Image: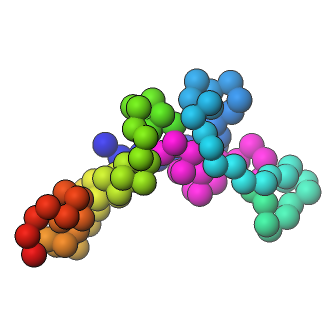
Amino acid sequence: MMIETDSPYCEIKNTHAGKNFIKSTWPSKKKEKYDQDCLVKGRNEPCLIRQVLEVVGGCKGVADINQLSTTLYHNTCRVFFPHDLDSAADALLSGGQDSK
């Protein structure tokens, strides 16, 4: 499994079925009141991948989203950067049970 956002459109709205699983929020302002320390309201920024992770974890009943994020990160690396993976990354993914 891998996850993605629909950047730059289609943010997770209050009407989204997974909205109750979201714990992370960032300040936002309308584009007319641009502030570099805030997201543009209504725009789906790449940093909001964290919210997608929280929704997936909630729907799957995963309590430890940090472990889920590690698993998803390694899945992504296996698809896009298979030549960069080594036994240390595989050991991390398996919970350190592999020998060095």
Q: Position of residue 20 (x, y in %)?
A: 62, 30
Identity of the residue drawn at 78% across and 47% down: 41
The front one of 78 and 56 is: 56
Q: Which residues are magenta?
A: 40-54
Picture quadrant where residue 60 is located: top left
Asked whether residue 80 is in view, the answer is no
Residue at the spot 14% in from the left edge and 71% down from the top edge: 87
**11 displayed left or right of 100:** right
Residue 92 spot, x, y in % from top left: 24, 65
19 vs 59, left or right, is right
Write the residue at 29% across / 59% down: 74
Residue 22 seen in the figure: yes
Residue 47 is one of the magenta-drawn residues: yes
The percent position of residue 55, horizontal first and vertical second, equals 51, 37
* 29 shown above or below 96: above
Q: Main secondary structure of the magenta part?
A: helix
In the picture, residue 42 is in which quadrant? top right
Q: Residue at x 64, y 49 (%)?
A: 24
Image quarter of residue 88: bottom left
Q: Is residue 92 magenta?
A: no
Quarter containing the C terminus:
bottom left
Q: Is residue 76 above or below residue 41?
A: below
Q: Quadrant of the N terminus?
A: top left
Residue 4 coordinates in the image, percent (x, y): 46, 47
Residue closest to the eye, 42 or 13: 13
